[in-house]
Image: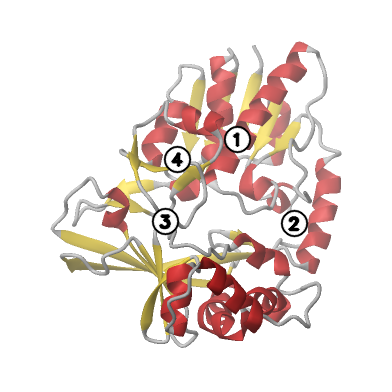
């Protein structure tokens, strides 16, 4: 039996804790917040009874059968398809951009082949190898769709003009030449009946796991453990000698209304003169429940300050340079593995986080059986 310290009770920490406890190790989990599940934390609203995604919408989706089967051990997953709408220039459209979006926006009745040919005709073919977000959009969807759906929203979301952002950000946003308005292309998609916090609580409900809420973990405490898995911010572990890595954070303005506020879980607001990026209506995430009243979040993005909750790593040139220094420091640590979104400074969906945490636990168990060292990273943060 090894004594394991785990920093963070989000999905990374909870999965690793569960797997190692199941394998017979004693695990201490430290969480600075008063609750588990990290940014996936869910709780009932006292006024409406709605299950609230406290840190913004989280829709579970994956094409990994392994991850899908694993997560469903801890709660029943209800059918849910994420169908996002967007308001741009006073009209409502479907996202991601699909055949309906294109026909609505341009007042056409294109079939798939015609729509594809049309976008090719309006694309900026002078851009051979897009380097920026703006160039990527102009090259593949043209000026009109870029201005309507991407430009203003991106300025609000990232706090900078799309010409300052790398093209890789937009490569994650598909354009479809059919009427499929499912936001994700994943094989499996759903919502946990009892919420994400219930799942994490069940993961941590083990006689060999000791959970310490509202409790920090100092680097000096690592010597008390055979191994530490750290899912907090990698720069914080070292005391920020290279400065703080940059993140965007989110502010949520909560409103309660009667009935149905917007008829959809998520609506993006693409125009730059609307200060919020999107509105989420949480009762629509639990469509199997019935609530007379409703609760919405208006979402605002800004630069993350010292005491804010970090959401999206910025990952521009300055941040990547800082990250290289922190990776070098991490590789000199003994018996510490950096995991998760903050520990590797990457934007990770829940299913990726869970899959990587399972890999980390399995790697640890394999190294123990062969008396081999555990690496600082199971996944290279620089990809």
- Please tell me which of labels 4 and 3 falls first in the chain: 4
Quick one: 306 or 10, which is closer to the camera?
10
- Please state which of the two labelled residues, at mark 4 or mark 2, is closer to the viewer: 4
- Please tell me which of labels 4 and 1 falls first in the chain: 4
Above or below, 108 relative to 194: below
- Please tell me which of labels 2 and 1 falls first in the chain: 2
- Please tell me which of labels 4 and 2 falls first in the chain: 4
- For label 3, the SS is loop
Mark yes or no: residue 24 visible. Answer: yes
Q: Which labelled disc corresponds to residue 355?
A: 1
Quick one: 224 or 252, which is closer to the camera?
252
Left or right, residue 219 beside residue 286: right
Residue shown at 81% from the left, 75% from the top: 128
Asked whether the beta carbons under mark 2 and mark 1 sit within 8 Å of each other, the answer is no
Location of mark 2 (residue) = 240
Quarter occupied by the N terminus: top right
Question: Mark 2, residues whose alpha carbon is within 10 Å: few (<14), some, or many (≥20)?
Answer: some
The CA distance from mark 4 to mark 1 is: 19 Å
């Amino acid at each position: 039996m090894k004594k394991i310290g785990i920093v963070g009770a989000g999905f990374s920490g909870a999965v690793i804790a569960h797997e190692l406890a199941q394998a017979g190790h004693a695990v201490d989990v430290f969480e600075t917040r008063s609750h588990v599940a990290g940014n996936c934390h869910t709780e009932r609203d006292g006024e409406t009874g709605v299950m609230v995604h406290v840190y913004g919408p989280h829709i579970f989706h994956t094409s990994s059968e392994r991850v899908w089967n694993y997560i469903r051990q801890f709660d029943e997953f209800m059918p849910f398809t994420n169908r996002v709408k967007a308001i741009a220039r006073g009209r409502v459209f479907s996202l991601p951009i699909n055949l309906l979006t294109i026909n609505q926006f341009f007042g056409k009745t294109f079939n798939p082949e015609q729509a594809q040919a049309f976008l090719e005709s309006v694309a900026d073919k002078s851009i051979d190898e897009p380097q920026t977000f703006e160039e990527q959009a102009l090259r593949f969807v043209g000026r009109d769709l870029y201005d309507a759906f991407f430009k203003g929203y991106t300025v609000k979301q990232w706090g900078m003009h799309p010409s300052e952002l790398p093209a890789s950000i937009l490569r994650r946003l598909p354009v479809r030449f059919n009427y499929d308005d499912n936001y994700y292309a994943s094989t499996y998609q759903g919502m946990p009946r009892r919420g994400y916090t219930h799942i994490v609580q069940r993961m941590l409900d083990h006689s060999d796991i000791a959970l310490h809420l509202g409790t920090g973990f100092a680097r000096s405490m690592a010597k008390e453990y055979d191994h530490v898995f750290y899912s907090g911010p990698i720069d914080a572990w070292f005391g920020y000698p290279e400065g703080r890595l940059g993140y965007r954070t989110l502010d949520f303005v909560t409103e309660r209304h009667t009935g149905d506020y917007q008829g959809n879980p998520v609506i993006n607001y693409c125009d730059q003169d609307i200060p919020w990026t999107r509105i989420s209506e949480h009762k629509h995430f639990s469509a199997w429940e019935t609530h007379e009243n409703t609760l919405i979040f208006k979402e605002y993005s800004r630069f993350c300050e010292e005491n804010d909750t970090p959401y999206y790593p910025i990952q521009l040139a300055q941040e990547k340079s800082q990250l290289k220094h922190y990776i070098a420091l991490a590789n000199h640590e003994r018996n510490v593995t950096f995991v998760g979104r903050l520990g590797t400074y990457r934007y990770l969906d829940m299913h990726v986080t869970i899959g990587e945490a399972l890999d980390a636990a399995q790697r640890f168990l394999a190294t123990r059986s062969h008396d081999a060292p555990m690496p600082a990273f199971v996944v290279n943060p620089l990809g």
